[in-house]
Image (cartoon, rainbow, N blue to C red):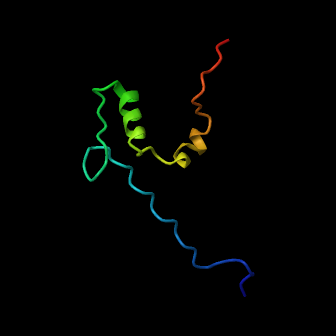
Amino acid sequence: MQAPGYNNNPVAPPPPAAPKKYDGQNGMPLYDHAHGGHYGASAAIATAGHAPPPETFSGHWGNVSTYPCARA
């Protein structure tokens, strides 16, 4: 007899989605570091409305802040 609340056939979680490719194809903006390096390219992608969802930066990335750090 099986205890209530247990499932003998657990459903596997879906595979993670493939990361977005910012290659200028399929309607995606081009990651072009020639215009301000990494930060310029990232800013252009975000300004174009293609920034990753905020959930991307949770978990291990939760301690990353956009505010300047105080130096001791």
**Front residue of 58 and 2:** 58
Q: Nearer the viewer, residue 14 or 38?
A: 38
Above or below, comparing residue 10 to residue 52 in the picture: below
In the image, taking residue 6 as reference, residue 45 lies left or right, namely left
The answer to whether 64 appears left or right of 34 in the picture is right
Q: Residue furthest right?
A: 3
Image position of 41 with respect to 7: above or below: above
| Residue found at the far bottom of this picture | 1
The picture places residue 14, in percent across and down from the top left corner, at 48, 65
Residue at the top extreme of this rendering: 72
The structure residue drawn at horizontal position 52% and vertical position 46%, both measured from the top left corner, is 56
Q: Quadrant of residue 70?
A: top right
Q: If the image is split into quadrants, where does the C terminus sit?
A: top right
Q: Position of residue 28 (x, y in %)?
A: 31, 48
* Rendered image quadrant of residue 60: top right
Q: Which residue is at a point 27% across and 44% down the rendered structure image?
A: 23
Q: As rendered, which of 32 and 59 lies closer to the eye? A: 32
Residue drawn at the location 72% of the way across and 78% of the way down: 5
Question: Left or right: where does residue 55 sit relative to residue 39?
Answer: right
Please count the marks in the image.
Answer: 0
Q: Quadrant of residue 16?
A: bottom left
Above or below, comparing residue 32 to residue 7 in the picture: above
Q: Position of residue 1 (x, y in %)?
A: 72, 88
